[in-house]
Image (cartoon, grey):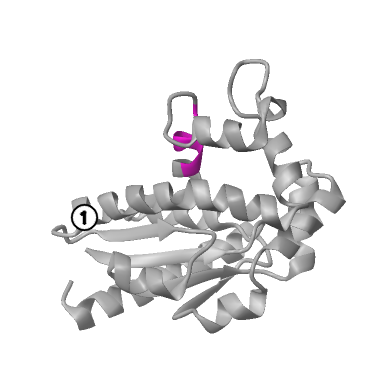
């Protein structure tokens, strides 16, 4: 396995990048998808989250009302820390399981993690860290226009993350996703060529 940890701020376009990498044959393990999975009814995070945040976050269909939960945690650092303490150990466990399943393969494995930390590189066996980057103003516009977020809600989510500068400092490769989809296609093509070069060096 040639393992890549991929990260980027909210609205940066991580999913657009992982979709394009998957089209080139990469195995994608997405932390956000795992969060959705473990918070579904019957999932290991469902009851702990309800117990911590109350019935006010239960939707009419019995699932967790994710927008309601987000409104709480992105405006309350203590609540966000509590949610992270419930969710991220479970996500980490699932991602380690997937890494172990892929370890003996010769696949490119992309682990998309919003809260990527330096220790993930060693723990999950990453060969490189890739950051999807765009100016904060561009991310904000996308969140409001494409996801229909309230501007203040979007700003709160951006503010809750590590800074753009800190993400870039930890990167082996930075993808610029500040422009058009055609520009992103070219950026991903360059990234894939870089990945192939790195794989040849490490012999994976």
Residue 58 in sight from this viewpoint: yes
The residue sitting at 34% across, 50% down in the picture is 93
* Image location (x, y in percent) of residue 151: 85, 51
**In this view, 117 is above or below 12:** below
**In this view, 125 is above or below 71:** below
Quadrant in the picture for residue 146? top right
Residue 141 in sight from this viewpoint: no
Q: Main secondary structure of the magenta part?
A: helix
- Residue pushed farthest top? 61
The residue sitting at 13% across, 59% down in the picture is 104
Nearer-the-camera pick, 129 or 108: 129
Number of numbered markers: 1
- The residue identified by callout 1 is 100
- Residue pushed farthest left? 104
* Image location (x, y in percent) of residue 122: 31, 73
Quadrant in the picture for residue 178? bottom right
- Residue pushed farthest front? 51
Residue 39 lies in the magenta stretch: yes
The residue sitting at 61% across, 29% down in the picture is 64
Please, what secondary structure does the residue beneath circle 1 have? helix
The magenta-colored residue range is: 35-40
């Amino acid at each position: 396995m040639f393992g890549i940890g991929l990260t980027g701020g909210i609205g940066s376009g991580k999913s657009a990048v992982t979709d394009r990498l998957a089209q080139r044959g990469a195995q994608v393990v997405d932390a956000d998808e795992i969060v959705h999975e473990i918070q579904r009814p019957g999932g290991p995070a469902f009851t702990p989250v309800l117990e911590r945040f109350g019935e006010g976050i239960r939707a009419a269909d019995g699932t967790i009302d994710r927008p309601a939960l987000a409104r709480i945690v992105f405006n309350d650092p203590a609540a966000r820390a509590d949610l992270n303490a419930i969710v991220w150990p479970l996500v980490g466990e699932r991602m380690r399981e997937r890494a172990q399943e892929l370890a003996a393969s010769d696949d490119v494995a992309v682990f998309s993690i919003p809260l990527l930390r330096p220790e993930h590189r060693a723990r999950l066996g990453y060969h490189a860290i890739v950051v999807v980057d765009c100016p904060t103003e561009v991310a904000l516009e996308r969140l409001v226009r494409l996801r229909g977020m309230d501007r203040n809600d979007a700003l709160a989510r951006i503010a809750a993350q590590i800074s753009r500068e800190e993400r870039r400092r930890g990167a082996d490769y930075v993808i610029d996703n500040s422009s058009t989809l055609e520009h992103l296609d070219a950026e991903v093509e360059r990234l894939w060529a870089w990945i192939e070069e790195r794989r040849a060096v490490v012999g994976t």
